[in-house]
Amino acid sequence: MRKLPLSLFFLLAAASVYAQSGSAKAAPDGFFNQWLARTSATQAKQPAWAVPLVTTYTGLIQVARADFTRQIAPARTDTWNFDNSKGLNLVPWANTELVVDLPPYIEHNSTAKDGWGDFSFLAKYRIASGNEQHGSYTLSAWVLTTIPTGSYKNGSTNASVQPNLGAGKGFGHFDVQTTLGATLPTGTPATTTSGRPVLWNTMAQYRIAKFFWPEIESNATFYKGGTNDGKTQEFITPGLIVGKCALHPSEPKARPGVAFGAGMQIATSHFHTYNHELVLTARWIF
């Protein structure tokens, strides 16, 4: 069953290729062409930065994405997370992004039972932005909602809402993006076990040539309430994103392309729930 997220990923990718290829029979003013033209016009008003490895992108992106992580705990046990709560990001109209995240499949190399994680979805609104010719900046707000669909304790016991604010600024080939949010469980026992943690991510990246985006991230969690009340956890994450590699490079207006990336989260705080984590990402941008 763990192949389901990948199957959906490639199905969406195939649909994207069909919708944007010359073999598609849709009229120039058909639904898909209108959608893609609207998305291009919306994204033209923001910088063309690569989507970070861990930190949420502060602009708008239309992508089918699958991530894979391998987490090493202090007890030296490792846990694989297939898909890592990624899925389909759409830009249905100006300044807005809607995201449907597939439940991840979590594989433990311990006595814990393997199983599916929680389903989640996100709504983002881009408050302000300027492309490279108009200030190179972004400012967005979004809300992530998680539904407790996990099996065998591989998810939360209660639904949660996570409001966030994110901003970015570019300086030539260099840019910095930062996000701040808080996870708010809707009931007990989640409020008494996990509390209401505050998440602060900051990422810096630099474009080399056309496709290479080395980056470094700080991923910090400040625990408020719950069993870890008052503790702080931080990871430094060096990584590399390659892309977007256009599927039709000779056609400037063609949208489909791919991007790949990898990085390693390394614990830098005294308190940490895991030591380090390998992060792999594959993206179909359309």
Image (tube, rainbow, N blue to C red):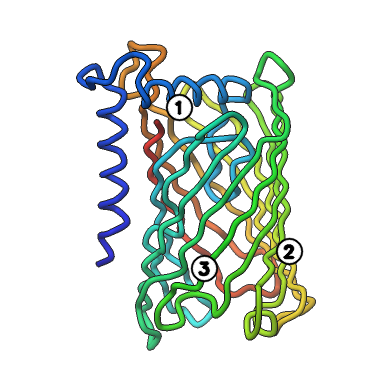
Q: Amino acid at mark 1?
A: Phe
Callout 3–callout 2 Cβ contact below 8 Å: no
State the quadrant of the C terminus.
top left
Q: Which quarter of the picture shows residue 235?
A: bottom right
**Marks 1 and 3, Cα distance to the nearest angstrom?**
36 Å
Q: Amino acid at mark 3?
A: Ile
Number of the label disc, if any, that sits on residue 68: none
SS label for mark 3 = strand
Q: Which quarter of the picture shows residue 192?
A: bottom right
Tell which circle, 1 or 2, labels the residue nearer the N-terminal end: 2
Number of the label disc, if any, that sits on residue 198: 2
Residue 140 screen position, x and y as percent: 69, 40
| Badge nearest the viewer, 3 or 2 | 3
- According to the picture, the residue beneath numbered tag 3 turns out to be 147
Q: Is residue 224 above or below residue 265?
A: below
Residue 165 screen position, x and y as percent: 72, 47
Q: Amino acid at mark 2?
A: Val
**Is 20 or 227 nearer to us in this picture?**
20
Graded by Cα atoms within 10 Å as few (under 14), some (14 to 19) or many (20 or more), the crowding at tag 1 reads some
Residue 267 screen position, x and y as percent: 62, 65
**Marks 3 and 2, Cα distance to the nearest angstrom?**
19 Å
**Is 228 or 275 nearer to us in this picture?**
228
| Badge nearest the viewer, 1 or 3 | 3
- According to the picture, the residue beneath numbered tag 1 turns out to be 211
State the quadrant of the N terminus.
bottom left
Callout 1–callout 2 Cβ contact below 8 Å: no
